[in-house]
Amino acid sequence: MSDLVFKPALELGRLLKKKKLSAVELLGECLTQYARHNDKINAVILTDLARGRSAARAADKRIAEGETLSPFDGVPMTAKESFDWQGHPSTWGDPAMVDNIAKTNAVALQRMLDAGAVMYGKTNVPLALADWQSFNEVYGTTNNPWDVTCTPGGSSGGSAAALATGMTALEIGSDIGASIRNPAHYCGVFGHKPTYGIVPYRGHLMPGSVSISDITVAGPLARSAKDLTAMMALLVGTEGIEAHGLQVKLPKPRAMALKDLRVAVKLNSAVSDVDQSYQNRLIALGEFLKKRVKKLTYEAAPAFSDEEAYENYITLLRATATKRMSDAEIDAAAQKARTFDPGDKSYVPLMTRAFALSHGAWLRANERRHQMAQAWDQFFDDWDVLLCPAAASAAWPHDQAGERHERLIPVNGKQVSTIDQRFWAGYSGNFYLPSTIAPIGLTPAGLPVGVQIIARAYNDLSALRVAEWIEEEFGGFAPPPGY
């Protein structure tokens, strides 16, 4: 059953329902992968095997009695460390939070448990979920299974690495700066960043906080696009106060057949240069689709500049950090901001100004954000999806020295800041749009890359359907060598 652990979760669920194997056996296969490979990868950093095996036995009993809860009943899962799992710590990689023991399950996790998924462990993250690498003083460093000298991405890096190595079949992550999309891209799996606010976030918050930050979302990762679609059917929906009156009903995919699809492709940006080896895979996908869709262009884009989109995103993204900053820290940022040339739009000045942003300035930035969101919406009158990169390159070597904005990665023979590629995170995220990552092959160096599929707000099912077509027609998940 060596290939069993790499099958899509829906297929595993069908095998369980047909009694071709038991949930206990399936969990055992994933745990075998964990035992063989986790020391090298360090993806799963906390386990509760007794609880997992108990859940698997309960699933087998339901299936035997014909009372299956969902297509995922009995299917093994793990979750990002920052999601509350009752009785276990949510440290966010911070040694100061090792005693932050969850009293309840995060709402999104609970929805998966209510569907019968068999939770057995949690996966690694960077400190405070604030890196495209996944390392911290509590649990150590997670490695990319395609090349253990490279990052698996972050902040849901453990999630993607666990999926890629067959340690789990389902994962839940979160995304404010490509934290679902980036690891899915680097590890060759699927991930979906939902429209803002449609998947509950409660139970994925710092202690003492009940309000959800701007931009950030919770969403699924898996080894198949159809798994993502099925997970979204379980995860989407209001809870708490909103549930008293609001419901979420996502529209059907805008194109019901590949031949009806209208596709725009964006390969590169002056803000974030994309490595040619990655662009070549995107071009191959574009040329493949060009013969099969209604129309495809490399020219169309929403009516605003990449430079303004990036500036607006960094401003609003970094402003979210002030929720955890002291007045003294904000005052210090204001003093530092005055030392920069007002016309300097590089990352450090943008970040520092955002830390000291007045409420009025935030409102003006937010107003411009919503104007650009309207431009996106007008763009989607003519195009069903926009395909673009998820990052600037394939996975890059571990680099844990200094500050994130000081670290450099190789792109087209040059050393560039890792921060530049935040453009690709904010291109959809800052405007609350859904975007799906689908694997599209390997670079000449043997590292996976994925395409980012952006759709109109609340058209999550359109992005997911395109990911399904790409998986069916062009290529999908492949296990890394040696697992």
Image (spheres, helix red, strand yellow):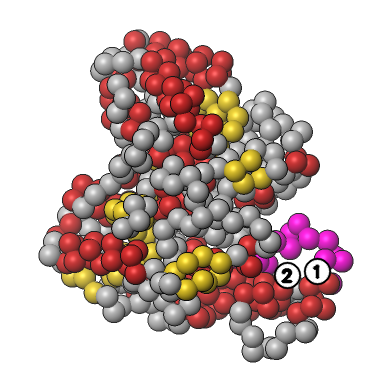
**Residue at the location (28% across, 47% down)?**
476
The residue singled out by tag 2 in the image is: 355
Does the magenta stretch mainly form a helix, a strand or a loop?
A: helix
**Residue at the location (54% across, 59% down)?**
177
Left/right placement of residue 467 relative to residue 363 reads left
Which stretch appears magenta?
316-331
The residue singled out by tag 1 in the image is: 330
Image quadrant where one finds the N terminus: top left
* Image position, residue 146 (x, y; %): 41, 45
Disc 1, SS: helix
Whether tag 2 and tag 1 are in contact, CB under 8 A, the answer is yes
Amino acid type of disc 1?
Answer: Ile
State yes or no: residue 328 in magenta.
yes
* Image position, residue 414 (x, y; %): 47, 73
State yes or no: residue 57 in magenta.
no
**Residue at the location (12% across, 65% down)?**
291
Relative to 52, does residue 220 appear above or below in the rendering?
Answer: below
Disc 2, SS: helix
Q: Say which quarter of the image contains residue 139.
A: top right
Name the residue furthest right: 328
Along the line of sight, which residue is nearer the eye, 391 or 317?
A: 391
* Image position, residue 458 (x, y; %): 41, 57
Could you tell me if residue 380 is visible in this image? Answer: no
Along the line of sight, which residue is nearer the eye, 167 or 176?
A: 167
- Separation of disc 2 and disc 1 at Cα? 6 Å
Rate crowding at label 1 as few (under 14), some (14 to 19) or many (20 or more) other CA atoms within 10 Å.
Answer: some
**Residue at the location (59% across, 56% down)?**
399
Amino acid type of disc 2?
Answer: Phe
Could you tell me if residue 433 is visible in this image? Answer: yes
